[in-house]
Every structure is written in C-alpha cells, then in structure tokens.
Amino acid sequence: MSEAINVGEQTFEKVVLQSEIPVLVDFWAAWCGPCRMVAPVLDEIAKEHEGKIRIVKVNVDEEPALAAQYRITSIPAMKVFKGGEEVRELIGAMPKQMIEEQLEGIL
Amino acid sequence: MHQIIIIGSGPAGLTAGIYAARAGLEPVLFASSVEPGGELMNTTDVENFPGFPEGVQGPELMEKIQAQAERFGTKVEYADVTALDLDGAVKRVTTADGAVHEAKALVFATGSAYRKLGIADEDRLSGHGVSWCATCDGFFFREKTIAVIGGGDSAMEEATFLTRFASKVYVIHRRDSLKASKIMQQRAFDNEKIEFIWNAEVTAIHGETEATGVALRDTVTGETRDLALDGVFIAIGNDPRTHLVHGKVDLTADGTIAVEGRSSKTSVAGVFAAGDVVDPSYRQAITAAGSGTVAALDAEHYLVALEDK
C-alpha cells in the first residue's frame, strides 16, 4: 500500500525526533478511507524530495499511546518534526499541491 | 476532443458514467484526488439502497458502482478540476496539473460539502476535538463524552455509530423535533448512551488547543449554558459544491444548480447537472443515481442533435 515505514513507541525517538532531516509523521489507520487516499500522495512527495524530508507512518490502532501523546483526534493527521520539534501540522486528506504548499519552507 | 466529460465520482457521476459508456460515448470521469466516491465513502451501513437486502457498506457500494461504470468503458481519472470554460460549443475542463480537457458535453455532479456552523472556533479546533466525520474520528473518543450537532439522518447515524466508542453522546438540535427518518430517530431514542438536548444552538466551542465543551443558547428562552465535552461532531447538513460554476450557470435560491423542469439541463447548452448539486430536498444515493441517469440521457440526446445539425 505505502512505501513509508511504520514507526512505534520504541522507534519514534530515534527515527523521528533525532532525525537529521525533517520527518513527516502520517498518523493513520486501516479503516480510514481518506488515509488510504493520502498515502500514495505522500509516497510521491517522499520520492520527489528525497533527502529533504522523510515520511514515516504511525498506525494509531497499534500505537494508541503515541496517538494520545500527540493528541490525535482526527486522521489522517500529518505532523512534521524538525530537530525534535513539531513545526507543522496538516489535518485531513488533501490534494498533493495543497500538501506541498503547507510544507513550504521545509521541502 | 471527448464526447462527454463527467465531473464527480459519487452515485450521480458514476451512474451517468454507466449510461454514457453504454451509449458508446466513451466518457471521461474526473474524480477528486483525495475524496473520490463522494459522501458514501464516509458512511458505514447503507440499508436503503435497493438490491442489497442485507445492507451494504458505503465504500463497497461505491466500488461496485465504479466497477460497473468502468466495465462499459468509463475512464476514471483521479484529478482535481480547478477551472471550467463553458462558453461556446466546446467545454474546457482544467485539472490541477494544468492540463485542459475538451468535450462537447459536460455532466456536473460534484455533490455537496459539509455545512459549517459558521463560528470561528470550528476551524480553529478542527482536528482537535471538532470533527465532521464520525466514521473517521469516532475511534479517538473511546469512553469519552461527545456531542453530535444536528437533527437529520446523518446526525442520527453519526450519534448511533459513535456510541460504539463514546460513553455518552449528546445530540444537540435547534428545534424540538427531528428531521431524520422515523427508523433513524427510533434507533437513536432507544440508545441508552444518547441524550437529546432540544432547542439548543451552539454559539461557541470552548478550548485553547482542543475542544473542551460548547456554549449553548436555548432557542426558546434565550438562556445560555456551557456543556463540557471531549469532542464535537458537526452534522448540520451539506451545501451544494458549486464554486466551479459560480457566475457561469444559473443557481437556485437554495444555492443548487438550476435545471430545466425534470431534466438535467442547466442554463448553459451542453452542460448538465446531477445529484446533490441540483437537489436541495432528497439527497439520497438512489435519487443521485437516478439523477445521473437523467443527465447521461439528456447529454446523449444533446450530442445526437449536434450531429444532426
């Protein structure tokens, strides 16, 4: 379905917070229709901007603690972390162009 | 140049696709890149679509209708339409990638979008306890206290669905009776987790970074009070999605696209409209599908008449 790796509680710190480059975390679930639509769009963005941003996923079903910690109440929710800080938040599925606009300054 | 372009991939657009394809018109159908399939994609059990005595899941129904349209040659493209040029005999459709697609006839079936309450807090707290989609977000409100705002079928469906997760679901409605169908009402009335708050208007949603409650105003007495909540689901209806045709085709006082009599003919020759975007009153999957049929048949007649000229 998607090429992005899943991160969990164990790996979040290392993969996301300590990353050298910005990381977009896609909070998703298998039962979420809009999440399925946005996943391939994120894959494209990851491919086109390789080296500038990394895209990873958190399955909220499997990682309820992370979902709660980041106060997710709506998915898809995409949070961008840079230097361990949350710098951007995108909520809901949106066209590629809109996602890229929201990521301006990062890509 | 195409014979016909259909914009929209809900029951209206795809059914127009089935008919247009079977008429040999080789339709091209533009579906939203992120929310194809329309409103039924956010619906769980569809129990009133004929032919499914056991009911069917909304997304599954849309998948089947799309497969049926594609079986006869409808070409479904996932691209967002950004502009329309409806002047003249050739209709031009611009998609987000900048490409311009031409057709002799156009079926406009863009459906409707969630209506907003119109208070500043809802955008600010959207995704932070304020939601328009119970099936998407209900999961996050396990054992929480939430409210559904609205009194129609979709509000009842959302409230009933949300009791799977929430410990308590208030239904906040501006009137003292519901617009919802009897069966949906009864289901909600029978549900122990659901409590109705009648004659109440939401004037504000509280919360700094996430929703913590709402301010209510009694529509009869004018009395105001606060209700503490963990989440707010807004289901107060839908507005026709007409922004692409503003100033290009005539609209009705309801904001829907005006069509001639029982047909799908808009004020512009060669442009036909179907589904929720023309329908202020019924707005069912089956009426949208029927409306899509009408549009495809009208377009077919129009194209035949063009040939004869």
Image (cartoon, coloured by chain):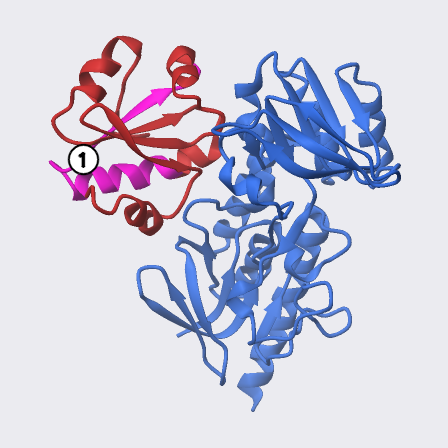
Quadrant where the C terminus of chain B is found in the figure: bottom right
Q: What is the tally of numbered marks visible in this picture?
A: 1
Quadrant where the N terminus of chain B is found in the figure: bottom left
Horizontal side of B267 relative to A79 (left or right) equals: right
- Residue A37: percent from the left, percent from the top? 40, 38
The relative height of residue A53 versus residue A104 in the rendered view (above or below) is above
Q: Give the range drawn in magenta.
A: A38-61
Q: Which of B69 and B258 is in front in this view?
A: B258
Answer with the quarter of the image where residue A29 lies. top left
Residue B63 belongs to the span the image colors magenta: no
Outermost residue, top side: A10
Q: Which chain carries label 1?
A: A
Q: Residue at x 61, y 15 (%)?
A: B144
Answer with the quarter of the image where residue B280 lies. bottom right
Horizontal side of B142 relative to B154 (left or right) equals: left
List the residue tagged with mark 1: A53
- Residue B187: percent from the left, percent from the top? 81, 24
Q: Decide if residue B66 is in sight here.
A: yes
The relative height of residue B137 versus residue B281 in the rendered view (above or below) is above
Spot the red chain and give its letter: A
Q: Colour of chain B?
A: blue
Horizontal side of B283 relative to B6 (left or right) equals: right
Q: Residue at x 70, y 71 (%)?
A: B259
Outermost residue, bottom side: B309
